[in-house]
Image (tube, rainbow, N blue to C red):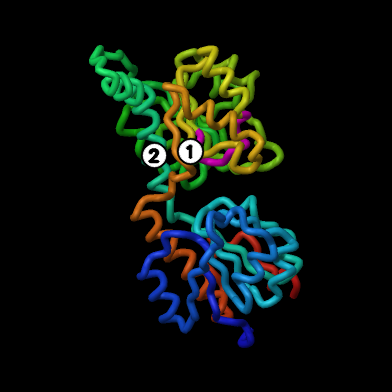
């Protein structure tokens, strides 16, 4: 392990001075990658990534695609550290086989995403976007909205962010329904929630928030069939991953007033550019609150996730183990 390069390349934006200073204090050589003009991290080709990471032992990234090809082009790379919690764009099977470590910034953005969900719920229910647009057009007629208070909220997936959301919802005196394999017996007592099956959740909830990973079993979990069974007054929130919702079906459900509204921080078009017209149509609707995958992008959350990502890199480049809750693949141990 002593031969591992301590060069760390950062391809994600908004990496702060404190995290950089921490890496340098651990004898890492830090390089902030200069991306080609008008090219985002997610658009980098394998060869572009190879050039940017030449000689690096550590890589701190956001949404770059880390395929087997990319990893094969980077034989010196020891750790792939995501400044975030999703890792579907990283080929972890390849990482295990090639002896690399993959980590996430577990616990760094729970609060910021949960805050965003609450904000979207209230914004849609109170018709804040519609009201401001009307006022901009010199119409001050009052638009009557609906409260979050004492409503039924369904949470699909109950990991760190789902739990953070449940903590915040307690103050609104809501009934919380949860459908998740991660639900623990103590959660029911702590949050006063009810464990229900998926059908019960979609049929009873006034607000539904998704906090599940995007895997084969969850792709298009919410589709035309589901929307027809939801309340016509229901609000759909997705701050997890595009693809959990069939966006084309959601657009139709909103246009036909099958549901009341939606809060969307993620879209299918992030992974499939051909669906960009569907995204454009969704964000143009007055009953949609949208953001560009920015749920974790607060000053506070970025500071936390930057530092967690930096700690993971430094620990591995020193020949040790990253914090256990952050490790999603460790090819060093797989290949022992």
- Nearest the viewer among 170 and 26 is 26
Identify the mark at residue 239; answer none if there is no mark.
none
- Nearest the viewer among 173 and 113 is 113
* Magenta-colored segment: predominant secondary structure: loop
Magenta stretch bounds: 238-246
Q: Name, please, the residue furthest toward the bottom.
A: 2
Quadrant of the rendered structure where residue 24 is? bottom left
Quick one: quadrant of the N terminus? bottom right
Circle 2/circle 1 CB separation < 8 Å: yes
Q: Where is residue 307 in the image (x, y as percent from the top left)?
A: 42, 66
Looking at the image, residue 246 lies above or below residue 320: above
- Nearest the viewer among 330 and 265 is 265
Q: Left or right? Give the position of 66 relative to 260.
A: right
Q: Position of residue 156 (x, y in %)?
A: 54, 34
Q: Earlier in the sequence, mark 2 or mark 1?
A: 2
Residue occupying image coordinates x 55% and y 27%: 196
- Nearest the viewer among 220 and 62 is 62
Quick one: quadrant of the C terminus? bottom right
Looking at the image, residue 233 lies above or below residue 117: above
Q: Name the residue under label 1.
A: 265
Q: Is residue 19 magenta?
A: no
Q: Position of residue 46 (x, y in %)?
A: 69, 62
Residue occupying image coordinates x 64% and y 52%: 89
Residue occupying image coordinates x 37% and y 34%: 118
Q: Mark 2 points at which residue?
A: 116
Q: Is mark 1 on a helix, strand or loop?
A: loop
């Amino acid at each position: 392990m002593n031969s591992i390069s301590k060069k760390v390349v950062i391809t994600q934006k908004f990496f702060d001075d404190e995290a950089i200073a921490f890496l340098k204090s651990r004898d890492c050589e830090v390089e902030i990658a200069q991306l080609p003009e008008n090219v985002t991290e997610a658009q980098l080709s394998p060869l572009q990534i190879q050039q940017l990471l030449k000689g690096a032992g550590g890589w701190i990234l956001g949404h770059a695609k880390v395929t087997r090809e990319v990893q094969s082009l980077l034989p010196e790379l020891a750790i792939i550290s995501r400044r975030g919690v999703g890792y579907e764009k990283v080929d972890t099977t390849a990482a295990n086989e090639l002896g690399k470590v993959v980590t996430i910034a577990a616990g760094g953005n729970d609060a910021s995403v949960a805050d965003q969900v609450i904000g979207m719920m209230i914004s849609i229910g109170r018709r804040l976007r519609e009201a401001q647009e009307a006022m901009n057009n010199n119409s001050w007629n009052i638009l009557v909205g609906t409260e979050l208070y004492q409503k039924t909220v369904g949470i699909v997936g109950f990991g760190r962010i789902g739990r953070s959301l449940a903590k915040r919802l307690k103050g609104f005196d809501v009934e919380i329904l949860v459908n998740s394999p991660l639900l623990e017996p103590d959660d029911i007592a702590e949050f006063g929630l009810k464990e229900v099956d998926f059908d019960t959740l979609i049929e009873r909830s006034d607000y539904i928030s998704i906090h599940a990973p995007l895997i084969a079993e969850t792709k298009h979990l919410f589709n035309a069939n589901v929307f027809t069974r939801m309340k016509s007054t229901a609000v759909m929130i997705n701050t997890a991953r595009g693809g959990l919702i069939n966006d084309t079906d959601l657009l139709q459900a909103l246009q036909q007033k099958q549901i009341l509204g939606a809060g969307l921080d993620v879209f299918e078009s992030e992974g499939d550019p051909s669906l960009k017209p569907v995204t454009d149509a969704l964000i143009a609707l007055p009953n949609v609150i949208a953001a560009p995958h920015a749920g974790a992008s607060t000053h506070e959350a970025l500071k936390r996730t930057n530092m967690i990502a930096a700690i993971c890199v430094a620990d591995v480049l020193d020949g040790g183990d990253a914090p256990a809750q952050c490790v999603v693949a460790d090819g060093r141990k797989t290949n022992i």
